[in-house]
Amino acid sequence: MSVSDYNALLDNVFAKLPEKKSKGERFEPPVPEIFLQGNKTVVRNFDAMCQKLRRKPEELAKFLFRELAVPGTIAAKTLVLQTKVPARVLNEKFSFYVDQCVMCRECGKPDTHIRYGAPVNTLICEACGATRPIRV
Ligand SMILES: [Zn+2]
């Protein structure tokens, strides 16, 4: 077998390999970039996080203000909390929110939205149609 035959054979083999299937991409929750500014805590990438979670900044901010019992404001694309909040605590709250209010329990996808209502709010999955009540 000549070298060119060999190369042709290789080409042939590679051409026949099945294309790599893209594995169902695992959702990577956004990680907050937190820094302290004087006595305040700033989440620098708050807007980007909200976009990734498909939540309005006000939705997520309201949750955090209540869970942390800390007042704050949305300023430009950041979230400003009026006290020092340990990054660990903030991370926990974000994880909790993603787990409770973003991820679908049925199909594990984050393609959801919240329908606000009384007496409960409902998490609705746009990927599989599952719904479940949430307490947030
Ligand atoms: Zn689902």
Image: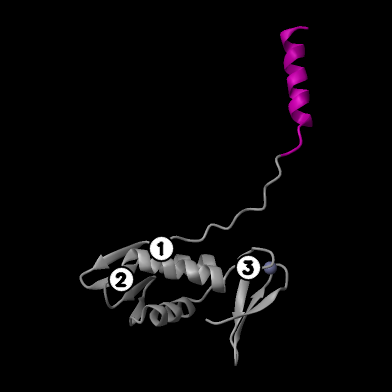
Which element carries disc 3, helix, strand or loop?
loop
Q: Which mark is residue 32?
A: 1
User: Quick one: label 3, few (<14), some, or many (20+) residues within 10 Å?
Assistant: some
Residue 10 located within the stretch drawn in magenta: yes
Which element carries disc 2, helix, strand or loop?
loop
Residue 54 seen anywhere in this rendered image of the structure = no
Vertical relation: 104 (above or below) 73:
above
Closer to the eye: label 1 or 2? 2
Three-letter residue code for mark 2:
Val
Q: Could you tell me if the residues under marks 3 and 1 are in contact, i.e. CB atoms within 8 Å?
A: no
Tell me which numbered mark, 3 or 1, is placed earlier along the sequence.
1
Instruction: Return the residue at label 2.
Output: 85
Three-letter residue code for mark 1:
Pro
Q: In percent of the image, x 69 and y 64: which residue is there?
A: 107
Residue 113 seen anywhere in this rendered image of the structure = yes
Q: Looking at mark 3, is its residue's CB closer than 8 Å to ligand 1? A: yes
Write down the region rendered in magenta: 1-19
Instruction: Return the residue at label 3.
Output: 111
Q: In percent of the image, x 71 and y 44: which residue is there?
A: 21
Three-letter residue code for mark 3:
Asp
Tell me which numbered mark, 1 or 2, is placed earlier along the sequence.
1
Q: Looking at mark 1, is its residue's CB closer than 8 Å to ligand 1? A: no
Task: Return the x and y of residue 82 as percentages of the image width and height.
Answer: 28, 78
